[in-house]
Image: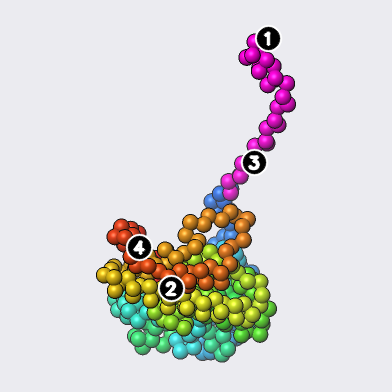
Amino acid sequence: MSPRAKAAAATSDKPKKAKKPAAPRKSKKAKAEAGSLGLTAAECATGTPSADVTRMRGLIEDAGGSVLACYREPFGGHWVALAALPLDRVKPTPYQRELSKAHADRLATVIPKVGRFLDPVIAVPDGDGFISPNGMHRLAALALLGAKTIIALVMPEPEIAFRILALNTEKAHNLKDKALEVIRMARAISVDPKRAGQSEADVAFELEQASLVTLGICYEKNARFSGGAYNSVVSKTETFSTAPMKKSLELREEHADKLLVLDVAVTAAVERLKAAGWTSGYLKPIVVARINPLRFLKPGKADAPPDFAKTIDKMIEGAKKFDPSKVRAQDVAIAAAVGGSGSDE
């Protein structure tokens, strides 16, 4: 038998490896058929208002307001009251971002041109009045115009204020706005006796990202903090805690303090770059990118996130040892081309 034939025979005697079964194809989410979800127009006006809405009617009238209508909203069938409320009995939720005076002023010039106020705010009961999670600028604009009343969609569930705030699109958030909003929500939950046992994980939808809690504390302590420079690192190392909010906030405070120490070290490195003749507005992102130990890390889905404290400690050490002579012109050009990562916009 020829060598080639012997090799072929030996190969044919070897047991064949069993083929792995093909991975099942993920079925595409079925698209809802048009007109198949929620209530019909007629159903929105039918039914007996819930006990919560009946109690809320009393709260509205006690506050000097008037219920204009009660109906079931068409998506989930929840009861809502359309009400006219005295403007001075409706306040923005205390944990949302700061008022943009420019935005409120613009609204105050637009409303008189239309001659009508046609954009109701959302409100929920709070004490002897109401709070709005999405109407801060409309409330301010009407106050500037001297209005007496605001129209609101009033809902009986106080927790809806947190959820709506997470979806607020009244004015685009920058990182600072969002982080401050998130830490204020977290603090409000931590001191609410009714929600004392809730954790970050329980309200993950409202908080959006665990990193925003830590960054929010940094902004509380330093309004000029460059959160955008560190957001990538923090978002990779922070995860939602399952401990009660009051307890997890203690850890977030520690993390924020460590992050502020890093910012001081990075700022010092930036000053050394400036002393070496560099004048770009992207020096901080360049320093952070150079000292970031997670820069090229590509963890698998099942991998645990990197440890926050160890990561930031390495970055602090790297910032202290940062050598301006190793920065090249092309590094600055690349940072400028991609916009850097130091902006909070």
Q: Earlier in the sequence, mark 4 or mark 3?
A: 3
Would you name the residue on which mark 4 appears? 326
Amino acid carrying label 2: it is Lys
Would you name the residue on which mark 1 appears? 1
* Residue at 46%, 83% in the rendered image: 221
* Residue at 56%, 79% in the rendered image: 254
Q: Give the range drawn in magenta.
A: 1-29
Residue 207, horizontal then vertical, whole percent:
55, 71
Would you name the residue on which mark 3 appears? 24
Task: Label 2: state its secondary structure.
Answer: helix
Residue 184 appearing in the image: yes
The stretch drawn in magenta includes residue 41 = no
What whole-number distance in Å separates the C-alpha atoms at marks 2 and 1?
Answer: 74 Å
Q: Earlier in the sequence, mark 3 or mark 1?
A: 1
Task: Label 1: state its secondary structure.
Answer: loop
Task: Label 4: state its secondary structure.
Answer: helix
What whole-number distance in Å separates the C-alpha atoms at marks 3 and 1?
Answer: 46 Å
User: Does 106 sit above or below residue 237?
Assistant: below
Callout in the foreground (3, 1): 1
Residue 82, horizontal then vertical, whole percent:
52, 76
Would you name the residue on which mark 2 appears? 320
Q: Nearer the viewer, residue 317 or 117?
A: 317
- In the rendered structure, the answer to whether residue 59 lies left or right of residue 294 reads right
Residue 3, horizontal then vertical, whole percent:
64, 14
* Residue at 64%, 41% in the rendered image: 24
Residue 102, horizontal then vertical, whole percent:
32, 79
Q: Earlier in the sequence, mark 4 or mark 2?
A: 2
The stretch drawn in magenta includes residue 5 = yes
The quarter in which the N terminus is drawn is top right
What whole-number distance in Å separates the C-alpha atoms at marks 1 and 4?
Answer: 67 Å
What whole-number distance in Å separates the C-alpha atoms at marks 4 and 3?
Answer: 50 Å
